[in-house]
Image (cartoon, helix red, strand yellow):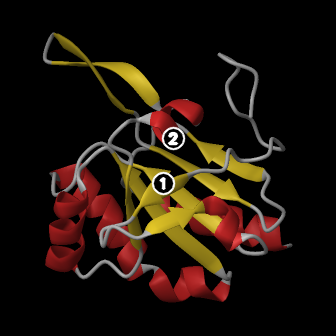
């Protein structure tokens, strides 16, 4: 675990966690040891930006598989919300419910946000590429959805080289 209030950086060991998936099955990061993991945090199920991002990962499934990469999506939404979101868009990857925001906090993505003059706490759209050794290879913060899948594929290509 990083020192409190110290942001994660490439080379750090990714904080392990266990969260329920869309079927209420506990999923731990450590169960993917030996694989590359694309761990992406997003604000809310079934909203325009989050849907576009999830569908980009869905549509890139074959390319991600060529890199032996597992995709895990994390938000604070409920298990039921995840199940509906996954079914509605035929998402072929696991969605994890971080309702207590503990994992989002550990990864430094639970932040104060501002929208239309309103201040609130929420998840900053971020992606962490975790290597087979469990270390962070790449970190994308304040992700812009357009073109992000290409950034992730480029990072996977670089990591494999």
Q: Nearer the viewer, residue 95 or 141?
A: 95
For image coordinates 35% across by 48% down, the residue present is 75
Residue beneath label 1, please? 40
Q: What secondary structure is found at the residue carrying circle 2?
A: helix
- Please give left or right for residue 132 compared with residue 16 in the image: right
The quadrant holding residue 60 is bottom left
The quadrant holding residue 51 is bottom left
Residue 74, percent from left and from top: 41, 53
Q: How crowded is mark 2: few (under 14 residues within 10 Å), some or many (20 or more)?
A: many
Image height of 116 relative to 136, above or below: above
Q: Nearer the viewer, residue 109 or 21?
A: 21
Q: Comparing marks 1 and 2, which lies closer to the viewer? A: 2
For image coordinates 53% across by 37% down, the residue present is 141
Residue 138, percent from left and from top: 70, 50
The quadrant holding residue 35 is bottom right
Q: In which quarter of the image is the C terminus?
A: bottom right
Residue beneath label 2, please? 103
Q: What secondary structure is found at the residue carrying circle 1?
A: strand
Residue 100, percent from left and from top: 37, 36
């Amino acid at each position: 675990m990083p020192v409190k209030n110290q942001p994660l950086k490439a080379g750090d060991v990714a904080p392990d966690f266990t969260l329920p998936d869309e079927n209420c099955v506990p999923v731990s990061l450590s169960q993917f040891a030996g694989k590359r993991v694309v761990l992406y945090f997003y604000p809310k199920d079934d909203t325009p930006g989050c849907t576009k991002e999830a569908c980009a990962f869905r549509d890139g499934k074959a390319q991600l598989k060529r890199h032996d990469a597992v995709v895990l999506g994390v938000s604070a939404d409920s298990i039921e919300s995840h199940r509906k979101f996954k079914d509605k868009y035929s998402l072929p990857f696991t969605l994890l419910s971080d309702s207590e925001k503990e994992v989002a906090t550990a990864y430094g993505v639970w932040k104060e946000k501002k929208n239309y003059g309103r201040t609130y706490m929420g998840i900053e759209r971020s992606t962490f590429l975790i290597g087979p050794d469990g270390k962070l290879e790449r970190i994308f913060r304040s992700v812009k959805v357009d073109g992000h899948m290409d950034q992730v594929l480029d990072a996977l290509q670089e990591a494999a080289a």
